[in-house]
């Protein structure tokens, strides 16, 4: 079975500052890892995903994440926050090549201060 | 290309009633997954349908049931509604029955309130 822990339910940064959202996973099989973003009253939008291969994954809107197997982590970063990045972010895990039971973290709400 | 759509957008029901939520998958997608997202929490997997058959189920009681139609659209039915069923219900469509690295595309959700 897989599970995800997102460290910090709320993160606040200033516009232009580094964004770091933390995610640790647990999986008994090779994982398939995702970051999704959710804006108010909307569904989830995929930011990026890791399957196999390069451990540094680049996504949309300037976000990237690094898969670190030894640390069971998949932290999301962005060098410079924009006001439009304010949203809820979810890390998710499923078994590699079998995503019919995707497990989500509780989410991290990102606030961007002007 | 039409994205994933869900209906209705909002719904208010009374405890004990039954509800049906609908999802139209993205064109060409044969797999639909349903998730429950309670307020302030991440989505929880309810079940997945692939080619009209249930293809995996999360930890939800049997009063949560579903259907998938030949056009791959889907329904989620909840019987004997409880107050804790109040949540945003998300539908996601994809290819391949969860196998492979196909992306899930989420709809905007149906907000269910049980009073």
Image: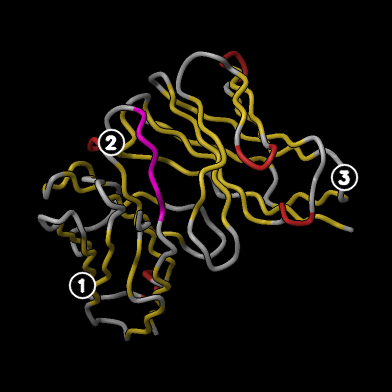
Residue visible at 22% across and 78% down in the picture: B18
Query: In the rendered structure, the residue with mark 2 lies on which chain?
Result: B
Q: Does the magenta stretch include residue B49?
A: no
Image location of residue B110, percent across then percent down: 39, 70
Q: Quadrant of the C terminus of chain A?
A: bottom right
Q: How far apart are the two marked residues, 1 and 2, measured between alpha carbons?
A: 27 Å
- Look at the picture and state if A68 lies above or below B33: above
In the rendered image, which residue does mark 3 sit on? A16
Q: Quadrant of the N terminus of chain A?
A: top left
In the rendered image, which residue does mark 2 sit on? B98
Image location of residue A90, percent across then percent down: 56, 46
Residue visible at 40% across and 48% down in the picture: B105
Image location of residue A48, percent across then percent down: 55, 35
Q: Nearer the viewer, residue A31 or A87?
A: A87
Specify the segment rendered in magenta: B101-106
Q: Quadrant of residue B98?
A: top left
Looking at the rendered structure, whether the residues under marks 1 and 2 are on a common chain is answered as yes
Would you call the spot at circle 1 few (<14 residues within 10 Å), some (14-19), or many (20 or more)? some
In the rendered image, which residue does mark 1 sit on? B79
Q: How far apart are the two marked residues, 3 and 1, measured between alpha carbons?
A: 49 Å
Does residue B33 appear left or right of residue B67 in this picture? right
Would you call the spot at circle 2 few (<14 residues within 10 Å), some (14-19), or many (20 or more)? many
Dots 2 and 3: beta carbons under 8 Å?
Answer: no
Q: Is residue B103 magenta?
A: yes
Q: Nearer the viewer, residue B7 or B45?
A: B7
């Amino acid at each position: 079975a897989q599970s995800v822990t997102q460290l910090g339910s709320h993160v606040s940064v200033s516009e232009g500052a580094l964004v770091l959202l933390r995610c640790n996973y647990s999986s008994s099989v090779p994982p398939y890892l995702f970051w999704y973003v959710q804006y108010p009253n909307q569904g989830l939008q995929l930011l990026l995903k890791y399957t196999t291969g390069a451990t540094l994954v680049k996504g949309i809107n300037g976000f990237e994440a690094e898969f670190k197997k030894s640390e069971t982590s998949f932290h999301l970063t962005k060098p410079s926050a924009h006001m439009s990045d304010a949203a809820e972010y979810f890390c998710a895990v499923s078994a590699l090549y079998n995503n019919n039971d995707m497990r989500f973290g509780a989410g991290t709400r990102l606030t961007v201060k002007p | 290309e039409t994205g994933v759509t869900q209906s209705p957008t909002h719904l208010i029901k009374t405890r004990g009633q039954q509800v049906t939520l609908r999802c139209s998958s993205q064109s060409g997608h044969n797999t639909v997954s349903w998730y429950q997202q309670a307020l302030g929490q991440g989505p929880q997997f309810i079940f997945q349908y692939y080619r009209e058959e249930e293809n995996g189920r999360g930890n939800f009681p049997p009063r949560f049931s579903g259907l998938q139609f030949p056009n791959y659209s889907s329904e989620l039915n909840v019987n004997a509604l409880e107050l804790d069923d109040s949540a945003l219900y998300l539908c996601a469509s994809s290819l391949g029955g969860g196998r492979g690295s196909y992306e899930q595309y989420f709809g905007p959700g149906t907000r269910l309130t049980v009073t």
